[in-house]
Amino acid sequence: MREFEKNIRKVEPYVPGEQPQQKVIKLNTNENPYPPAPGVRAALASMDTDRLRLYPDPSSEILVRELAEFYKVAPSQVFVGVGSDDVLSMCFLTFFNSEKPIFFPDVTYSFYKVWADLYRIPYECQALDGDFRIVKEDYYKENGGVIFPNPNAPTALYEELVVVEDIISHNRDVIVIVDEAYIDFAGRSALELIDKYDNLIVVQTFSKARSMAGMRIGYAIGNPALIKYLNDAKYSFNSYTMNQTALICGAEAVKDKAYFEERIRKIIETREWAKGELRKLGFSFTDSRANFIFATHPEYDAGELFEAMKKEGIYVRFWGSRRIEQYMRITVGTREEMEAMFAFLRKYMKKAEK
Ligand code: PMP
């Protein structure tokens, strides 16, 4: 081993879902099957490219202002970043500096473990129960901070606000981060608790309900003191995280509440219909409240099914990891995309019967 090797920070990176360049039925990374709000297209068409000479506004004011107005909070309560991955990473760096382990569920967004390792934060996973539910009492023990998604990923399960509040109220001496990437498809947001708990940070994204995964915008909302700490860390890392195009397009997307709500309604409608179709085919799945369904079949191996679907150009997500070896995660696409997937599944299962 070369001498310098021992001083290199080595990490086992997060592995994102595939982004195939050929056309496939893409149900593998929880993107929105619909385009962004029409205002985004118009903003891009009339973009002032001369403006790109200049650095963007480091405070991201136009976007922060729109988000503050939408969520009825003060601009000083909003932090924006390059997707919620960037925001979450900044939160780990800023808030999780205890010698005590941070807590998150054993089956959850696999990036948490990667950030903890990257920043050398000790962590302890708390096991979900047999139905993949969060056991709130597990989070009463002493810890260095708490993070969990609600709805959880990849389980798609939503915990009611009373459960979320119970965890926050038992952890007043540390920061609790609620990762609400999928909240718009689910139910009440922990944003309702922001003014009550000064140790709460809620993180959301433009990648799912706002159809802008490609633009990379995420945000955190919390009390102004915590947001100031986040901004101090950000300015010590990279002043210009948000590019000019993202700021303008992001602000436009937030302005169109009607479009946002209509597309969410449509995805929920397709999700509920798809659950019925999956049930008819013998799948079982958790009570999804997200834009994806976490499904398993008693007779078909999830790994084999995943490969067979992929061969047909139907991409879903499969991990094969502990506790979820027999589960696939299927993003809710358009009704047509889901029909195509079901047509394949019916054919596959019929063939297997023979
Ligand atoms: N949190 C959860 C639970 C997710 O599933 C994802 C999507 N991979 C993210 C955060 C990050 O999303 P983005 O960076 O696109 O906002």
Image (cartoon, rainbow, N blue to C red):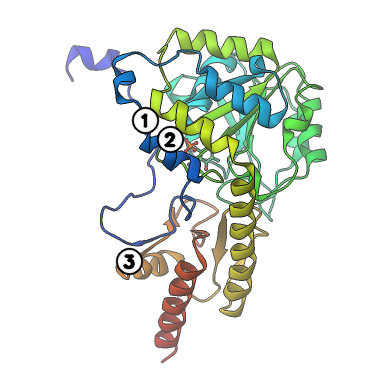
* Residue beneath the point at 55% across and 66% down: 296
- Image coordinates for residue 40, horizontal then vertical, percent: 46, 39
**Crowd tier of the residue under label 2, counting other residues whose Cα lies within 10 Å: few below 14, some 14–19, many 20 or above:** some
Instruction: Please tell me which residue is depicted at 50% across the width and 18% down the height of the picture.
Output: 60
Q: Is residue 113 visible from the viewing direction of this image?
A: no
**Which type of secondary structure does the marked residue at label 1 adopt?**
loop
Amino acid type at image mark 2: Ala
Quarter-of-image position of residue 316: bottom left
The location of residue 270, given as percent across then percent down, is 59, 65
What's the residue type where badge 1 is placed?
Met
Query: Mark number for residue 47?
Result: 1
Distance from disc 1 to disc 3, alpha carbons, whole Å, reads 36 Å
User: Which residue is label 3 attached to?
Assistant: 313
Proximity of marks 1 and 3: CB atoms separated by less than 8 Å: no
Label 2 residue SS: helix
Image location (x, y in percent) of residue 136: 76, 38
In terms of secondary structure, where does tag 3 sit? loop
Mark 3: few/some/many CA within 10 Å (<14, 14-19, 20+): some
Q: Residues within 10 Å of mark 1 (few under 14, many from 20)?
A: some
Q: Nearer the viewer, mark 1 or mark 3?
A: 1
| Disc 2 from disc 1: Cα separation | 6 Å
Query: Is ligand 1 within 8 Å of the beta carbon of the residue shown at mark 3?
Result: no
Residue annotated with mark 2? 43
Q: Left of 315 or right of it: where is 281?
A: right
Instruction: Write the residue at 75% across / 25% down.
Output: 194
